[in-house]
């Protein structure tokens, strides 16, 4: 049994952190589904920037859309919805077979709206309606300003992938926004079965402290943060508040481990996959990590319910001069800025390609 199949059998969903037209046209995504147990995918501006700038697969469609009067963001979202709609159709049998638990694809709202809740909700509604796919997540940043947008989107019946989470506290705040949206739906007599995932970024922690801590602590921070988030996730599922919602038909917001490609060249290329195995969660990974795990990865065991040794590991980092709370805030801020930069690069790539093609 391949390690990817073993992880799937354990109850964790393997999602691909990539989407390109080439991936769809070549049948590679279908192959990942059939052979590597992939059951969903995520996307972001950097992924689309690379896909559009480094491929001629979009050229004919860009010419057509340009002649139709589209440019900039409007042109990008047209291309993105086309790709993600095709991917969503490939995952639809999984979505149906798992009673809407799995089989999702994700599309991000403009990162320029990360600190504007009202505009974020408006764009989320527009994109969700435009795609018209039951297994599409709209990605909304879990920033302080994004939390009201998440609540409102859930209340509106929009499935949400909460992104840019970096700590257990961020995940709890995202879950609170999700539950508020569900509670409002119940109060309004609406179906509470609106899906969501909460994406916590893992590898950026270790990248941020590389060379700043003793060698004994190298590449241990991301896993400890993930363990702590998983404990908080399980505590939420056991809470009276969630149990009440579940009894009325709500379905749990699943924890998603994102940014799980290894950034340290001296570490295992599957470091964060085997270490973060847990049922009813998701791990999203790029092609290289997915193939590496299928080839030589190992599922050593399940994440401990109590977080294992995460408290001791995090305390060791604090002792070494790393403020966990401070770094979480900094990483979220840097992540939002990085997404904005990627978005601007994407729009520049589209503009450059449009001019070249015309």
Image (cartoon, rainbow, N blue to C red):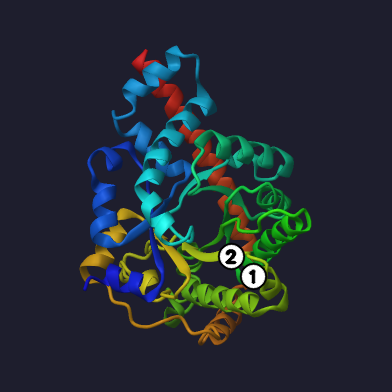
Residue 103 drawn at (x, y percent): 42, 55
Give residue 326's quadrant in the image: bottom right
Residue at point 73%, 40% (across, down): 118
**Pointer 2: what residue?**
251
**Pointer 1: what residue?**
246
Q: The C terminus appears in which quarter of the rendering?
A: top left
Sequence-wise, the earlier of marks 2 and 1 is: 1
Query: Is residue 113 shown above or below 322?
Result: above
Residue 108 drawn at (x, y percent): 53, 44
Residue 278 drawn at (x, y percent): 44, 75
Residue at point 67%, 72% (across, down): 242
Q: CA distance from mark 2 to mark 1?
A: 6 Å
Query: Is residue 289 shown above or below 66?
Result: below
Residue at point 54%, 73% (across, down): 225
Q: Secondary structure at mark 2?
A: loop
Please tell me how many numbered marks the rendered image carries. Answer: 2
Dots 2 and 1: beta carbons under 8 Å?
A: yes
Q: The N terminus appears in which quarter of the rendering?
A: bottom left
Q: In the rendered view, does 188 fall on the left or right side of 209? A: right
Q: How crowded is the residue under tag 2: few (<14 C-alpha within 10 Å), some, or many (20+)? A: some
Front one among 153 and 275? 153
Front one among 62 and 33? 33
């Amino acid at each position: 049994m391949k390690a990817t199949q073993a992880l799937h059998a354990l109850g964790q969903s393997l999602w691909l952190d990539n989407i390109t037209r080439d991936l769809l046209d070549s049948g590679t995504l279908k192959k990942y589904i059939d052979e590597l147990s992939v059951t969903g995918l995520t996307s972001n501006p950097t992924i689309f920037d690379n896909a559009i700038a480094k491929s001629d697969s979009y050229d004919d469609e860009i010419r057509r859309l340009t002649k139709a009067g589209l440019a900039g963001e409007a042109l990008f979202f047209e291309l993105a919805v086309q790709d993600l709609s095709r991917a969503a159709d490939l995952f639809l049998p999984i979505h149906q077979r798992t009673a809407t638990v799995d089989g999702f694809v994700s599309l991000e709202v403009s990162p320029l709206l990360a600190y504007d809740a009202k505009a974020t909700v408006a764009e989320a509604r527009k994109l969700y309606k435009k795609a018209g796919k039951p297994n599409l997540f709209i990605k909304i940043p879990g920033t302080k300003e994004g939390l009201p947008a998440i609540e409102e989107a859930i209340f509106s019946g929009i499935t949400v992938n909460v992104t840019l989470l970096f700590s257990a506290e961020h995940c709890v705040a995202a879950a609170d926004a999700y539950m508020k949206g569900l509670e409002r739906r119940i109060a309004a007599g609406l179906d509470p079965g609106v899906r969501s995932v909460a994406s916590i970024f893992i590898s950026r922690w270790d990248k941020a402290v590389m060379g700043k801590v003793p060698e004994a602590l190298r590449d241990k921070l991301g896993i400890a943060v993930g363990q702590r988030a998983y404990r908080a996730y399980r505590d939420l599922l056991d809470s009276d508040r969630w149990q009440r919602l579940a009894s009325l038909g709500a379905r749990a917001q699943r924890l998603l481990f994102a940014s799980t490609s290894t950034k340290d060249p001296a570490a295992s290329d599957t470091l964060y996959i085997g270490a973060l195995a847990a049922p009813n969660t998701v791990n999203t990974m790029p092609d290289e990590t997915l193939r590496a795990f299928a080839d030589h990865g190992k599922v050593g065991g399940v994440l401990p319910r109590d977080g294992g040794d995460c408290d001791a590991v995090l305390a060791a980092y604090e002792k070494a001069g790393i403020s966990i709370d401070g770094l979480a805030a900094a990483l979220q801020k840097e992540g939002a800025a990085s997404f904005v930069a990627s978005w601007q690069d994407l729009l520049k790539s589209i503009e450059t390609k449009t001019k070249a093609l015309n």
